[in-house]
Amino acid sequence: MLKVHHLRIGRSIFTVWLLEELGAPYELEIYVRNEMGRAPPELKNAHPLGKSPVIEDDGFILAESGAIALYLLEKFDPENKLGPPQGDAKAKAEWMQWLMYSEASAFAPLLMKLLLSRTEEKPPVFDMFATGEVALQLGYLEDRLSNREFVMGDRFQAPDIGTTYIAQMAERLGEIGPYPALKAYLDRNIARPAFQRAAEKTGG
Ligand SMILES: N[C@@H](CCC(=O)N[C@@H](CS)C(=O)NCC(=O)O)C(=O)O
């Protein structure tokens, strides 16, 4: 059975959420962060980078949430309910852009904010960059969601999973206040039964 190596608390809950949305069978191996908030060394037994998510499917090992999402869709979504549009190159590329956006553009500024929140020192070069970039990324999402229920339109699809992760991180960092459409989107998505099951099974 497909195994997910899940590090609490972090983005691999979103791999589990996708599996729950797809109704796919899986088992979980759960790891706990150390006192510095880092992964324990045992996660390196699953993948040399020692980061999560990692999936293991009959000896096939895969890391990187976006690639994992595509693999799971290919394997468990034969009716293509949550996957990319087929046959239209532009529509598919736009869908892929949104699948990758959360990890590629949105995440780094939020991570920088998170790290800055853990230290007294706030070097202006980092602080100003993070503040400006967080506003840019969250403002972009706010615009996108101000007239759409989900990032691709009126239907929940796989790119919503990573985007919800960004919204959740923004909320944890106290940054979501100025973005009501993003906040409503977050609340709507985490109320989904599949997310609730993932949260319960992983412990967050
Ligand atoms: N780009 C990778 C990032 C993986 C990653 O950094 N995962 C974090 C969890 S949120 C992690 O394992 N951090 C633990 C550490 O770096 O010690 C992905 O999306 O899968």
Image: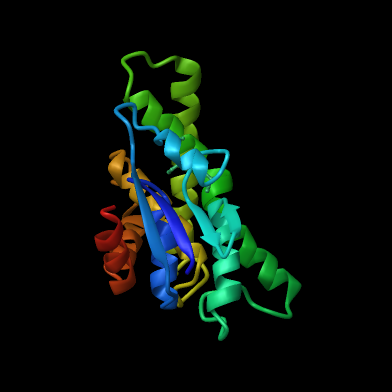
Say which residue appears at 57% left-offset and 57% top-offset.
Answer: 66
Residue displayed at 32% across by 24% down = 118
78, 120: nearer the viewer:
78
Q: Residue at x 30, y 46 (%)?
A: 171
Relative image position of residue 180 (x, y in whole percent): 31, 55
Image side of residue 174 versus residue 101, left or right: left
- Image coloring type: rainbow
Q: Up-down: is 130 above or below 1? A: above
* Count of marks overlaid on the render: 0
Whether 25 is drawn above or below 144: the answer is: below
Q: Is residue 115 visible?
A: yes
Query: Residue 108 at x, y = what percent?
Result: 51, 37
Q: Taking the image as drawn, is residue 136 in sight?
A: no
> Looking at the image, which residue is at 47% across and 69% down?
1
Image x and y of residue 110, in percent: 43, 38
Q: Depth check: 61 or 187 in front?
A: 61
Picture coordinates of residue 138, whole percent (x, y): 44, 47
Q: Is residue 14 above or below residue 176?
A: below
Left or right? Give the position of 7 relative to 94: left
Q: Residue 203: which quarter of the image?
A: bottom left
